[in-house]
Amino acid sequence: MLSLKDASKGFSAVGSEPRLSVLLTLVKVGPKGLTIGEIQKELDIPASTLAHHLRLLEASNLIKQEKQGREVTCSANYQNVKTLADYLLHECCSEI
């Protein structure tokens, strides 16, 4: 189970519209993920801004980044996304 500190870090990471959009896009695309360029094109986010959001999502372990040649592929860390969602349901909804 997550600690309050780790849960807070995860919820903070998805606490902005652009970061939530990035995470939702990566969750929807599946395990293969997307390159940073593909995310940028999909969401129309400037490269420097996207880099900032990706750093925060990776630091909270909600996404993974893997360098493949000259490109970096990002994918959702499904286990940690699920753990974060489960934490919220467990802590807030005792009847579930």
Image (tube, rainbow, N blue to C red):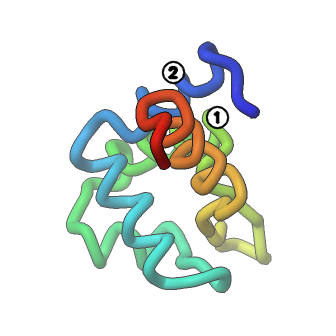
Rendered view: 56 above or below 79: above
Counting other residues with Cα less than 10 Å from the Cα at mark 2, is it few (<14), some (14-19), or many (20 or more)? few
In the rendered structure, find residue 35 and report the number of the disc placed on it.
Answer: none
Mark closer to the observer (2, 1): 2
Instruction: Mark 2 or mark 1: name the one nearer the start of the chain.
Output: 2
How many marks can you see?
Answer: 2
Depth check: 82 or 49 in front? 82
| Residue 55: quarter of image | top right
Depth check: 51 or 57 in front? 57
Instruction: State left or right for residue 36 relative to residue 15.
Output: right
The kind of secondary structure element at disc 2 is: helix
Q: Amino acid at mark 2?
A: Ser
Instruction: Residue lying at the far top in this picture: please name it.
Output: 5
Q: Amino acid at mark 1?
A: Ala
| Residue visible at 27% across and 54% down in the picture | 46
Q: Quadrant of the N terminus?
A: top right
| Residue visible at 25% across and 68% down in the picture | 43
Whether pointer 2 and pointer 1 mark residues with C-beta atoms closer than 8 Å, the reply is no
| Residue visible at 39% across and 40% down in the picture | 14
Give residue 74's position: percent from left, percent from top: 61, 66
> Which residue is label 2 attached to?
8
| Residue 35: quarter of image | bottom right
| Residue visible at 77% across and 75% down in the picture | 68
Give residue 60's position: percent from left, percent from top: 61, 35
Instruction: State left or right for residue 65 relative to residue 86.
Output: right
> Which residue is label 1 attached to?
59
Give residue 93's position: percent from left, percent from top: 43, 37
Give residue 75's position: percent from left, percent from top: 62, 68
Instruction: Residue lying at the far front in this picture: please name it.
Output: 95
Rendered view: 67 above or below 3: below
